[in-house]
Image (cartoon, helix red, strand yellow):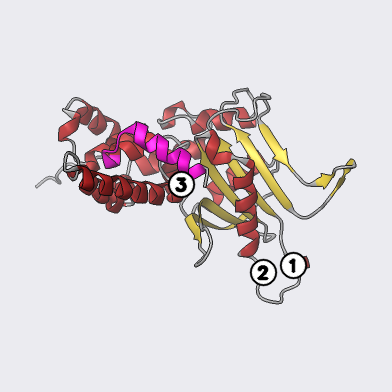
């Protein structure tokens, strides 16, 4: 008696089969398979899944971005929440701590509005607020790094990395030395150097197109694993189901329509706070028109 053939999961072939079908007949999970097949490391949910508990992989990223070769990561958590009962909470794509105790937040930001300077300031302050115990000496506050990897060159000067440090206004050569570091990595940068190759790899959806064998291996592991690929869909299933309820209220009387509008705002703001989805994906998941999603996204950014 021969063994039955081993089941193989070819996400690209499966996604191509789904694309040939009527989009209106696809289930949420089938849409998720298509999304994961197309996903690159510039997708924050996918990146978080790729680097989940991956100390070596995160150290690889940090050493390139910080132009080091000696950084070792002690711990990694992805989709990490820093919450507050009375003030705004934040949701980190990757939080890492190195062997020296320094703390790193790596964020994917595909829109310019998501990487505004005051957001960087707020994230930096939230990292600090999570580090000291009551009455602990301020000298024990470790260095923190907030790193935005942006889809485009949001500052427009063509630099691979924009490094932000505090210094004295009347003498820019004197470092304030507060241990706060903010980095913007230009995702549009392409050159034959470490950052250029890294940003090229961040935009690849297939391992064979990547320069880095380490990143290619990580991408292949996730996309070649049916359970992990589908798991990314379950992360948003609850929001998706709420979105379906919104869709079912469309076409009803004006009073109910106004109620649906309030519900749309509530659901969309919840999704924006998670900082996990592009506006296009939110529109697809909730059946809310992209124009409406964009309108509420702008409102949310102005809060």
Between 215 and 169, the one nearer to me in the picture: 169
Classify mark 3: residues with Cα within 10 Å, few (<14), some (14-19) or many (20+).
many
Total marks placed: 3
Specify which label sits upstream in the sequence, 2 or 1.
Answer: 2
Tell me: residue 141, above or below residue 119: below
Rendered residue at 17%/41% (across/down): 5
Q: Nearer the viewer, residue 81 or 218?
A: 81
In the orientation shown, which residue stands out farthest toward the bottom? 135
Q: Secondary structure at mark 1?
A: helix
- How much space separates mark 2 and mark 1, taking CA atoms? 8 Å
Which of the numbered marks, if any, corresponds to residue 140? 1
Between marks 3 and 2 in the image, the one whose residue lies nearer the viewer: 3
Mark 3 vs 2: CB contact within 8 A:
no
Instruction: Categorize mark 1 by other alpha carbons within 10 Å: few (<14), some (14-19), many (20+).
Output: few
Disc nearer the start of the sequence (3/1):
1
Residue 222 included in the magenta stretch of the image = no
Q: Position of residue 87 (x, y in %)?
A: 53, 62
**Could you tell me how far apart the alpha carbons at marks 3 and 1 are, in whole angstroms?**
30 Å
Answer left or right for 302 relative to 72: left
| Residues rendered magenta in the picture | 285-301
Horizontal arrangement in the rendering, residue 149 relative to residue 53 (left or right): right
What numbered label is drawn on residue 132? 2
- Viewer can see residue 184: yes
What residue does disc 3 label?
275
Residue 3, position as x, y percentages in the image = 15, 46
Asked whether 169 or 291 is in front, the reply is 291
Question: Which residue lies at the image location 55% right of the left edge and 28% below the top edge?
Answer: 152
x then y, percent, for residue 156: 65, 25
């Amino acid at each position: 008696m021969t063994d039955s053939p081993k089941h193989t999961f070819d996400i690209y072939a499966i996604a191509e089969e789904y694309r040939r079908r009527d989009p209106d007949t696809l289930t949420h999970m089938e849409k998720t398979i298509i999304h994961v097949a197309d996903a690159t490391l510039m997708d924050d949910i996918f990146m978080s899944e790729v680097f989940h508990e991956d100390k070596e992989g995160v150290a690889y990223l940090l050493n390139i971005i910080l132009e080091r070769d000696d950084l070792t990561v002690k711990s990694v958590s992805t989709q990490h929440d820093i919450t507050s009962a009375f003030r705004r909470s934040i949701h980190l794509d990757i939080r890492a701590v190195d062997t020296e105790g320094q703390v790193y937040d790596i964020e994917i930001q595909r829109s310019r509005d998501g990487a505004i300077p005051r957001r960087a300031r707020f994230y930096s302050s939230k990292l600090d607020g999570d580090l000291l115990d009551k009455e602990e000496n301020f000298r024990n506050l470790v260095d923190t790094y907030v790193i935005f990897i942006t889809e485009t060159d949001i500052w427009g000067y063509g630099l691979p990395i924009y490094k932000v440090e505090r210094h004295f206004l009347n003498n820019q050569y004197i470092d304030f030395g507060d241990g706060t570091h903010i980095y913007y990595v230009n995702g549009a940068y392409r050159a034959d150097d470490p950052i250029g190759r890294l940003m090229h790899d961040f935009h690849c959806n297939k391992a064979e197109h990547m320069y880095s064998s380490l990143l290619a291996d990580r991408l292949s592991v996730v996309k070649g694993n049916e359970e992990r690929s589908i798991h990314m869909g379950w992360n948003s299933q609850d929001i998706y189901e709420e979105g379906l309820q919104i869709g079912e209220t469309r076409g009803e009387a004006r009073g109910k329509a106004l109620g649906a509008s309030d519900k749309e705002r509530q659901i969309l703001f919840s999704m924006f706070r998670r900082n996990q989805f592009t506006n296009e994906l939110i529109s697809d998941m909730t059946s809310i028109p992209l124009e409406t999603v964009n309108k509420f996204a702008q409102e949310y950014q102005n809060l």
